Amino acid sequence: MPARRRTVLAGFAVAPAVAAFAGPAHAPPAHAAPARRSPSASGFRAGVGVSDVTGPVAEVGMMGYSSFDQVAHGLHQRTRARAYVFDTGGGTARVAYVCTDTCMIFQSVHDAVLARLAQRFGDLYTERNVLLTAVHSHAACGGASHDYAYNLAVLGFRQQVFDAEVDGIVEAITAAHDDLADATLSYGRSELLDASVNRSRDAFDRNPIADRDYYPHGIDHWMRVLRITRAGLDVGAVNWFATHCASLTNENLLVSGDNKGAAAYFWESDAGVRHLDGVVPFVAAFPQTNSGDMSPNLAGEPGRGPTDDEFENTRIIGERQVAAARAAFESATTLPVGPIDSRILYLDMADQTVSGRYTDDGREHRTSPACIGAAMSAGSTEDGPALGLFPEGTPNPLADALGGMDVDVPQWLADAQYPKLVLAPVGLLPPDGWVPHVVKIQLLRIGDLYIAGGPAEFTIVAGLRIRRTVADELEVPLENVIFQGYANSYCSYCTTPEEYDAQHYEGGSTLFGRHTLPAYQQGFARLAGALRDGVDVPRGPAPRDLSHLQPFFGPTVDHDEPLPGTSFGDVVLRPAESVRAGDVVEVEFVTGHPQNDIRRGSTFFEVQRRDGTGWVRHADDSDWATRFHWRRESTHSAIARITWDVPAGTPPGRYRIVHFGEAKSRGDGTISSFTGTGDEFDVA
């Protein structure tokens, strides 16, 4: 074997006020030899972009908790896609990385985005070099999937949700493409100990001591940050940290990016970002990593910890992530210029033969068709109650239209999934399973940094084992490899075999059996070996396409009517004449249905401040301090309630709230715009 040079990523800071600890996690893992390095290119180039992916915010099922009762009735903050494109000035290879404030990236969205990119850019952006991921917000719109199990609770496929996500992601990538310029990339790390807890500690403790020692607190406590600088100005940051986006409970009915969407907003707002003004000097994404067993609910119950207020918890967990990210950002060390590269592999996870090299007993094993276990139905006590997907005696028109779920569990499948108690063999349901089984795994290289993307919610030890597999195959230090969950598709959870045996919520949700993780490790080893040797790996089988059968059984908008004696835009609740910081301003308007125009890239309202003889926008529906509530007053009439929590530091002056809406006529269904203007008030 030829001599190889080893490069270790540096810049590992400890965030202020966070106690350091002694232990193996501080020491870089030992490897036999460094990675093979291609000749350096002339330099990195990077581009950043952001776009709106907010779907309809009223009468749409929300994604994450699978609760029939969690139907959106308003908006807290707009959800966005943040894109980063990297290449080298002297080469043709590039990669695109996108993080959205949604719950998952489904195969349907992935495929549509790539088709749109091909129309615009040819073969420049492909399934090989584009990685799409989501923050896993449990307060995002549902219905973008073509997988029936993930659409049951939202009563089917929602075209508006799908279009908003696809359009926004394509726009963000296009903006990043157009923004490409010479850049310096830096990488840093800091500790964050008070933004997550292990919600499945008993399962975690079943892992070998080498795994437990790597995480002495039972959490993945590292914030990892990629800093992007151009011409001496910081233009972006990608901030990986493992904690569920479940600070908001299933009782919340306002669309939101949860704690990670809030974190992105806080940092970008501080940097001067004003989306509606087209001012985006800095793009900050807060993606997940291996967060399958990481909860932000520090008190061990939904909506509890650090406080008993779910929105306050969302803010606090978001701000803690920002603080840790800033610490890593400030201490980040410049990455040496190196190759940009990528590899993908599609695996049929229902039918993998796994070598004994990757199994815990050293013997060959097989995966099996997807099954949901009783432990999944029981739910997670820390983040949410039992899943409502399959309640006995509850009719579901989508399930009925697809032929129901009355499928016996054959003994061979029960044996293959042991010790899971199988509740539903979703992989056997017609026409080709209700969850995906052919899924993409991906490996990106950006200089000496490697990003391994998998399509599930991996526990921290499951993610660690994939990182070790990739690092060993590449012969690079472990810290050079970042694990990226929720990537490109979604097929529930992935635990270690030892955790699977405990059959907690995560184990019951590991669809393809006890050897799911070893199968992924085997696939990632192939990718890493191919990347190391500069060769391609066969793509694998094609994912199934169920786009032709996507029914929807939820409510639709027939027409809108104003309340008797009113017109659209009329004010029915007026604000106080004078308020101070800390007060809540409330205004209500007669309105139409938000589905008439989701106002993507726009806003449902503005908080305006008088400036001389005119009015200027001070806040809108993307801001933390505002909320947009929508409610039906009758079959066809509705009210919009807009609130503004006046923040500290708000400039004194004259203000008003203006609502923008659309109404659908009874006759021909024409949609007309209207504006409602609230009474003026003073901020003292």
Image (spheres, helix red, strand yellow):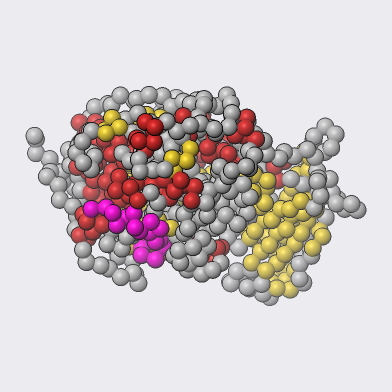
User: Is 413 drawn above or below residue 659 in the view shown?
Assistant: above
Foreground residue among 589 and 386: 386
Q: Position of residue 565 (x, y in %)?
A: 91, 53
**Image quadrant containing the C terminus:** bottom right
Residue 194 part of the magenta-drawn span: yes
Left or right of 133: which side holds 553?
right
Give the residue at x 12% y 43%.
Answer: 33
Residue 60 part of the magenta-drawn span: no
Tell me how many marks there are.
Answer: 0
| Most frequent secondary structure within the magenta stretch | loop
Residue 314 appears in the picture as rendered: no
Give the residue at x 35% y 40%.
Answer: 418
Foreground residue among 475 and 380: 380
Q: Position of residue 9 (x, y in %)?
A: 24, 51
Foreground residue among 422 and 122: 422
Left or right of 595: which side holds 211?
left
Q: Residue furthest front?
A: 411
**Image quadrant containing the N terminus:** top left
Q: Position of residue 392 (x, y in %)?
A: 59, 43
User: Is 368 drawn above or below residue 319 in the view shown?
Assistant: above
Foreground residue among 465 and 123: 465
Q: Position of residue 32 (x, y in %)?
A: 11, 45
Left or right of 655: which side holds 341?
left
- Which quarter of the figure has residue 204? bottom left
Give the residue at x 83% y 55%.
Answer: 570
Residue 658 appears in the picture as rendered: yes
From which residue to which does the magenta span run? 192-208
Q: Residue furthest right?
A: 565
Give the residue at x 27% y 46%.
Answer: 465
